[in-house]
Image: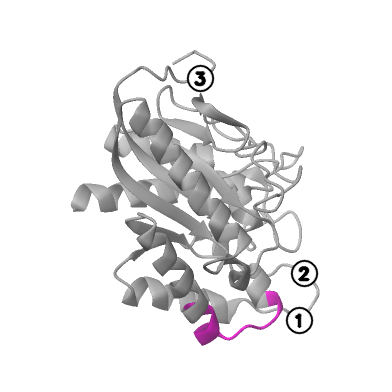
Amino acid sequence: MNAEYFDKNQSASVDLFLFMGQSNMAGRGIVTTEHGQGAPALISGAGYEYRAVSSPDRLHPISEPFGRFENRKGGIDDGDMKTGSMATAFANAYYEKTGIPIVGVSASKGGSRIDSWQPGGDFLNDTIARLNSARNFLTANHYFIRHQFMLWCQGESDGDISKSGEQYRREFECMLNAMLKAGIEKCFLIRIGHYNGSGTQDYSEIMAVQDTIAQTNKNVVMVSRLFAKMQERGLMKDDFHYFQEAYNIVGQEAGENAAGYIMSI
């Protein structure tokens, strides 16, 4: 579809996704001479962004940087830090398997720890408000919402303070329970990768507990562990973040696995 935005009077089935977490969900991807791969072109009709903050009366075809206009003072505000995310790659891969477009809602904040995503806090309140706004818009304009999901990638900031895996699990599940009550059906989890700096940070405990959460919580489905491979592949641009190619790889795998899960139920 070549229009600037999706015709709000067009009847369609969609799957609604919240893109939640910290900076590697928000997207810090860049392109350099050595790492020249940009974000993929969006397959026509594969995905749309609902901009709950900046443009709540229409859908826009997903573009990068995804969510760059979605800053709310007193809520989720990532400033102008977004440069390129996994959203386009995820939407393409999901659509290629399911034939169903996604409607993506940006709800991610760089540097945020899991304790800032607890019920009653500014970030979760804003996320739920964005979810409600998206649902209301889609319903009012005759879209059929097949599923409502969250895609989560977060935990580096908890590794930075050596948070225990058990404490992370408790806080994650408290957050997740609030999102389930808000109408989310499943959390698709993207496990964090390794620290790439000269400090003493070690993310292995957070990575391990994310594996455990996916294995033991029926409401969580692991869809990618590939960020852990990017350090050895030379695709980390700094201590914490990745070149755009890495976000494309992770987004594609996550989209394929999320789609595979949906098609299996």
**Which amino acid is tagged 1?**
Thr
Label 3, secondary structure: give it. loop
Q: Nearer the viewer, residue 97 or 16?
A: 16
Q: Main secondary structure of the magenta part?
A: helix
Give the secondary structure at mark 1: loop
Q: Quadrant of residue 66?
A: top right
Q: Is residue 68 magenta?
A: no
At label 2, counting other C-alpha atoms closer than 10 Å, the crowd grade (few under 14, some 14-19, many 20 or more) is few
Describe the element under mark 2 as helix, strand or loop: loop
Residue 230 visible: no
Q: Residues within 10 Å of mark 3 (few under 14, many from 20)?
A: some
Type of residue at label 3?
Tyr
**Residue at 72% in and 48% down:** 73
Residue matched to label 3: 5
Q: Is residue 259 left or right of residue 228?
A: left
Residue at 70%, 41% (x, y): give it. 83
Question: What segment is highlighted magenta in the picture?
Answer: 160-169
Q: Earlier in the sequence, mark 1 or mark 3?
A: 3
**Residue position for label 2:** 197
Q: What crowding class fits label 1: few (fewer than 14 Cα within 10 Å), some (14-19), or many (20 or more)?
A: few
Which residue is identified by label 1? 200
In magenta segment, residue 162: yes
Above or below, 246 relative to 91: below
